[in-house]
Image: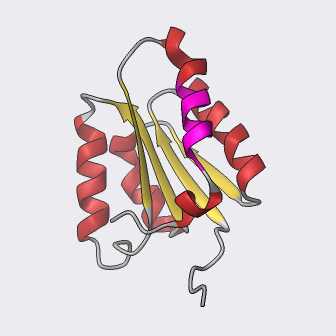
C-alpha cells in the first residue's frame, strides 16, 4: 500500500538563482506542483513555515552555514519535521552548472523526491 501523499508544493532555497531555474526545469518534468524559490537558505525558514510545503530542496555551497542551520531548524520544528528535505550541495564554480544539473537529473526520480529524508 502506498501511503505517500502527492507533492503539490515545493520550496527551493538556493544561493544560486541560475541553478534554481535549472532545478525548476527538472521539477516541471518530474512532478506537477507549485515551486517557490527563496534566494537564501538562511532566510528560508519563515517562508517554509508560511507555505508548509510537501518538499523542501536546499541547494547551497558546501560551506553555507545558513543551509546547515535551516536543516536543523526544520528537523526540530514539530510542524515541519515530517516534510522531506532534499539537499544539493555544490563545490565548484558556475562553469560546472550544466554538469551539476545533468548529474542531478541522472540521479533523481519522482520516488527519490518524495521519500522522507529527515
Figure check: 50 above or below 109: below
Depth check: 105 or 62 in front?
A: 105
Instruction: From the top left corner, tell me how far across and down residue 83 is, in percent.
Output: 44, 69
Figure check: 54 above or below 29: below
Colouring rule applied to residues? secondary structure
Residue 64 is one of the magenta-drawn residues = no
Instruction: From the top left corner, tell me how far across and down residue 87 is, in percent.
Output: 40, 46
Residue 107 is one of the magenta-drawn residues = yes
Question: Viewed as shown, does residue 2 lie left or right of 87?
Answer: right
Quadrant for residue 106, please give it. Answer: top right
x 72%, y 58%: residue:
31
Depth check: 114 or 106 in front?
A: 106
x 22%, y 37%: residue:
65
Instruction: From the top left corner, tell me how far across and down residue 54 is, in percent.
Output: 55, 68
Question: Viewed as shown, does residue 22 lie left or right of 95?
Answer: right
Quadrant for residue 63, please give it. Answer: top left
Question: Viewed as shown, does residue 77 lie left or right of 86?
Answer: left
Figure check: 106 above or below 35: above
Magenta part mainly helix, strand or loop? Answer: helix
Q: How many marks?
A: 0
Part of the protein shown in magenta: 100-108
Figure check: 16 above or below 110: above
Q: Is residue 17 visible?
A: no
Question: Viewed as shown, does residue 78 lie left or right of 44?
Answer: left
Q: Is residue 15 visible?
A: yes
Quadrant (top left, top right, bottom left, bottom right) of the C terminus: bottom left
Quadrant (top left, top right, bottom left, bottom right) of the N terminus: bottom right
Instruction: From the top left corner, tell me how far across and down residue 79 is, in percent.
Output: 37, 78
Quadrant for residue 102, please give it. Answer: top right
Amino acid at each position: 500500500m502506498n501511503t505517500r501523499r502527492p507533492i503539490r508544493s515545493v520550496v527551493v532555497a538556493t544561493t544560486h538563482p541560475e541553478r534554481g531555474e535549472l532545478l525548476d526545469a527538472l521539477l516541471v518534468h518530474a512532478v506537477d506542483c507549485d515551486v517557490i524559490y527563496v534566494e537564501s537558505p538562511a532566510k528560508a525558514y519563515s517562508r517554509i513555515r508560511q507555505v508548509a510545503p510537501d518538499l523542501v530542496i536546499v541547494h547551497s555551497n558546501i560551506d553555507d552555514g545558513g543551509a546547515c542551520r535551516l536543516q536543523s531548524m526544520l528537523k526540530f520544528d514539530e510542524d515541519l519535521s515530517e516534510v522531506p528535505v532534499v539537499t544539493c550541495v555544490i563545490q565548484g564554480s558556475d562553469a560546472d552548472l550544466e554538469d551539476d544539473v545533468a548529474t542531478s537529473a541522472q540521479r533523481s526520480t519522482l520516488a527519490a523526491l518524495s521519500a522522507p529524508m529527515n
